[in-house]
Image: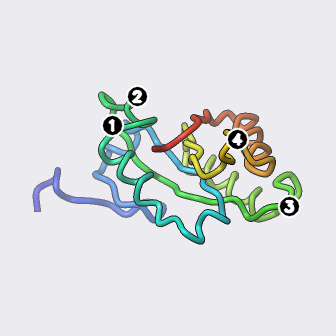
Amino acid sequence: MAQQERTEKKNGCLAQPGKEKDMKKIAMLNCLKANEICTGASCFRAFLRKEKSFERYRNEETELAAFFRCNGCGRDPLTDAGIQEKLQRLQEEHIEVVHVGVCTKDRAGKRCETIQKIVEQLESRGISVVDGTH
């Protein structure tokens, strides 16, 4: 198999050797409750086609390195061990940007308080946050 066609498994992700450090590592954060009806298809389509909020990466190599959800309404992300573990993992994976799904806002455009606290935690850890996916 040719060198450029080989892939390596690193931290559970497949990547071409040496290429992963050149790519912008992106994650998506979505609402757990929305998971009842959402497949994530529109978010993934927008990422793969570099459309909507992902259009800014049109001329960049990107890797969708994580897709995660909050742990539910009413669970304080500041004291939720599961969310804290997820945030730590994002740092370990060197995620640069998290796109926050449209499902995290109500019809009036107000962001869920739980998600807002997660956004603040991401920013405090040096991870950029972009509003929107598709």
**The disc labelled 4 sits on which kind of residue?**
Leu
At x 57%, y 34%, the residue is 130
At x 30%, y 44%, the residue is 49
Q: Nearer the viewer, residue 101 or 76?
A: 101
Q: Residue furthest bottom?
A: 36
Q: Nearer the viewer, mark 4 or mark 2?
A: 2
CB-based contact (under 8 Å), mark 2 and mark 3 = no
Q: Which residue is mark 3?
A: 74
Q: Which residue is mark 2?
A: 56
Q: Which residue is mark 1?
A: 61
**The disc labelled 2 sits on which kind of residue?**
Arg
Image coordinates of residue 114 in percent, x first then y, are: 79, 51
Measure the alpha-carbon separation of dots 2 and 3: 33 Å
| Element on which disc 2 rests | helix
**The disc labelled 3 sits on which kind of residue?**
Gly
Q: Residues within 10 Å of mark 2 (few under 14, many from 20)?
A: few
Q: Which residue is mark 4?
A: 122
| Element on which disc 4 rests | helix
**The disc labelled 1 sits on which kind of residue?**
Glu
Q: Quadrant of the C terminus?
A: top left
Mark 3 or mark 4: whose residue is earlier in sequence: 3
Q: Nearer the viewer, mark 1 or mark 2?
A: 2
Measure the alpha-carbon separation of dots 4 and 1: 22 Å
At x 55%, y 38%, the residue is 97
